[in-house]
Structure formats: structure tokens, C-alpha cells
Image: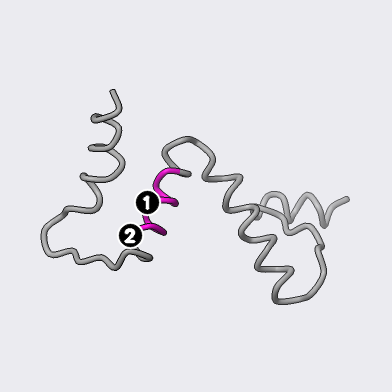
């Protein structure tokens, strides 16, 4: 089972024809692939957007995840 997961997570993505990876670049791709394959992608991107908003604007106002969320926030 572990070998199959490694093949799915690592080999299928990292060993495609013509691709060359640095170790840091490969680690980032594998981290993101692991997050997405485990179903935590949406939560990760919400966190990422919030961190970027804080870095750019210096406060932690909640950033809506979708256009629908923005519309609901404006309507409230």
C-alpha cells in the first residue's frame, strides 16, 4: 500500500519526461500535492490567502474564499 501511494504521489508527478527539479522546488510540489490529495486543499488555500492578506495589508481581516462568500458578506 505504501509503495502504491509513493508511486501515485511522487513518481507519477516527479518523473515525467523532460522535467528537472531542484530539491526545494520538488519539496514544494510534493507538499502541495499531498495537501490536495488528502482533501485539505480548500483549507490550505484559505489559510494561504489569509496569510498573504496579512502580509500585504498588516491586519487579519477575514478574506472571503469565494465570490459567493463576498456577495453574502456585502449583503449582510
Which region of the structure is painted magenta? 26-34
Labelled disc at residue 20: none
- Residue for point 25% across, 50% down: 13
| Label 2 environment density (alpha carbons within 10 Å; few <14, some 14–19, many ≥20) | some
Write down the quadrant of residue 47 in the picture: bottom right
Q: Is residue 29 left or right of residue 71?
A: left
| Residue 41 percent across, percent down from the top left | 52, 45
- The dominant secondary structure in magenta is helix
24 part of magenta stretch: no
In this orientation, which residue lies closer to the viewer: 24 or 60? 24
The single residue placed furthest to the top in the displayed view is 1
Viewer-nearest residue: 47 or 76: 47
Q: Residues within 10 Å of mark 1 (few under 14, many from 20)?
A: some
Q: Residue 18 in the image: state x and y as whole percent.
A: 12, 64
Residue drawn at 70 percent across, 76 percent down: 56
Q: Classify residue 13 as left or right of residue 25.
A: left
Per the image, the residue denoted by label 1 is 30
Tell me which residue sits at (71%, 55%) in the image: 64
Measure the alpha-carbon separation of dots 1 and 2.
6 Å
**Where in the figure is residue 59, as x and y percent of width and height?**
82, 69
Nearer the observer, 21 or 32: 21
**Mark 2: which secondary structure?**
helix
Q: Is residue 30 magenta?
A: yes
* Residue 67 x/y as whole percent: 65, 55
Task: Tell me whether circle 1 and circle 2 mark residues in contact (CB < 8 Å).
Answer: yes
Q: Which mark is residue 26?
A: 2
Amino acid at each position: 500500500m505504501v509503495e502504491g501511494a509513493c508511486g501515485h504521489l511522487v513518481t507519477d508527478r516527479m518523473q515525467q519526461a523532460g522535467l528537472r527539479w531542484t530539491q526545494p522546488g520538488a519539496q514544494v510540489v510534493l507538499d502541495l500535492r499531498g495537501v490536495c490529495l488528502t482533501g485539505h486543499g480548500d483549507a490550505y488555500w484559505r489559510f494561504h490567502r489569509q496569510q498573504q492578506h496579512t502580509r500585504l495589508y498588516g491586519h487579519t481581516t477575514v478574506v472571503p474564499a469565494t465570490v459567493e462568500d463576498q456577495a453574502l458578506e456585502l449583503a449582510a
